[in-house]
Image (cartoon, rainbow, N blue to C red):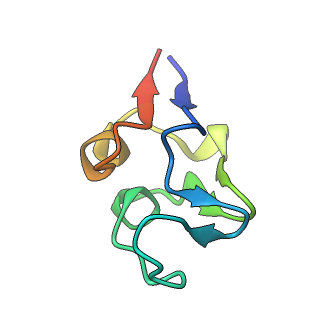
Amino acid sequence: MVVVIDYDKCCWKDGACQSCNCKGACEGCVEACPTGALIREDTIKIIPENCTDCALCISACEYEAIRIE
């Protein structure tokens, strides 16, 4: 299985939240991940070797931008 991000739905673009203007103080997928498998850069990046397929990022994303395939 692999975590997939739909960047069209994701609120994090160009290094900033595009939905709430939180300036990086989000409480979303990155914070929900207990293993540090997601990081914010220009977009949300996945570090596959850190991912345990726990799906906490999926439930934390209010935009339904993350899924496991």
The residue at the point 44 percent across, 37 percent down is: 65
Total labels: the figure holds: 0
Q: Picture quarter containing residue 43? A: bottom right
Q: Residue at 53% across / 65% down in the picture?
A: 18
Is 19 placed left or right of 58 in the picture? right
Q: Position of residue 33 (x, y in %)?
A: 40, 56
Q: Is residue 27 above or below residue 66?
A: below
Image height check: is 24 above or below 6?
A: below
**Residue 26: where, in percent of width, then height?**
41, 75
Q: Is residue 64 left or right of residue 38?
A: left
Please state the horizontal and vertical placement of residue 51, each as a whole percent of the image: 52, 41
| For residue 43, side relative to residue 34 (left or right) | right
Residue at 57% over, 37% down: 8
Q: Residue at x 64, y 37 (%)?
A: 48
Q: In the rendered image of this protein, does residue 62 appear above or below residue 69?
A: below
Corner quadrant of residue 19: bottom left
Outermost residue, left side: 59
Give 19 or 6, whichever is nearer the viewer.
Answer: 19
Vertically, is 32 above or below 21?
above
Quadrant in which residue 32 is drawn: bottom left
Could you say which is closer to the camera, residue 35 or residue 28?
28
